[in-house]
Image: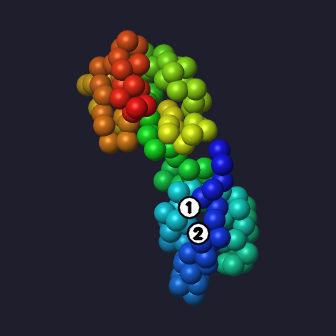
Amino acid sequence: MAKNYLTKENFEKLDQVIESHKDMQGPLMPILHEAQHIFGAIPIEVQKVISEKLNVPMAEIYGVVTFYSQFTLEPKGEYLISVCLGTACYVRGAQQIVDKIADITGVAVGKTSADGKFSLEATRCIGACGLAPVLTVNEDVYGRLTLDDVPGIIAKYKG
């Protein structure tokens, strides 16, 4: 994926955020939240800047970024497809749904398409067990899925 989000302007915004937070107690989390908002992700290049300006080890920053699910190392696509692999969904064929989506979109789990259109995630229980198997595309929820439903769902977002 192109790193066109790593612009000079975005790094200037990050510098302003760091400057405004660096003297407060526990500045790392608010800075990471803002960095995620600015860049759409917190890649290594952004982590290095935060590390240097806050004098916090890279390992600590990387550990925080990879521990919390709201942070990501690479930007998500325009359409985030999340397939629940919780127990109810899994036993009703959710893994096959994931595989079918990957085949149709060409996107592996945890990755984003080269054009930035789709990201695919396998998630744990989303609390819609009665609709199993379930997937979401951004805020849209699709339940009681079959493999035959998948091409039509993806087609709605391709065009």
The label shown at residue 10 is 2
The N terminus appears in which quarter of the rendering?
Answer: top right
Around disc 2, counting alpha carbons within 10 Å, would you say few (fewer than 14), some (14 to 19), or many (20 or more)? some
The C terminus appears in which quarter of the rendering?
Answer: top left
Tell me the distance, in whole angstroms, between the alpha carbons under discs 2 and 1: 7 Å
Marks 2 and 1: CB-CB under 8 Å?
yes
Q: Is residue 109 above or below residue 2?
A: above
Q: Is residue 4 above or below residue 94?
A: below
Q: Position of residue 103 (x, y in %)?
A: 55, 20
Identify the residue at image location x=35%, y=29%.
Answer: 156
Q: Is residue 148 above or below residue 66?
A: above
The label shown at residue 27 is none
Identify the residue at image location x=53%, y=84%.
Answer: 20
Q: Nearer the viewer, residue 94 or 42?
A: 42
Locate residue 55 relative to residue 25 in the image: left or right: right
Q: Position of residue 61 (x, y in %)?
A: 66, 64
Return the residue at label 1. Answer: 39
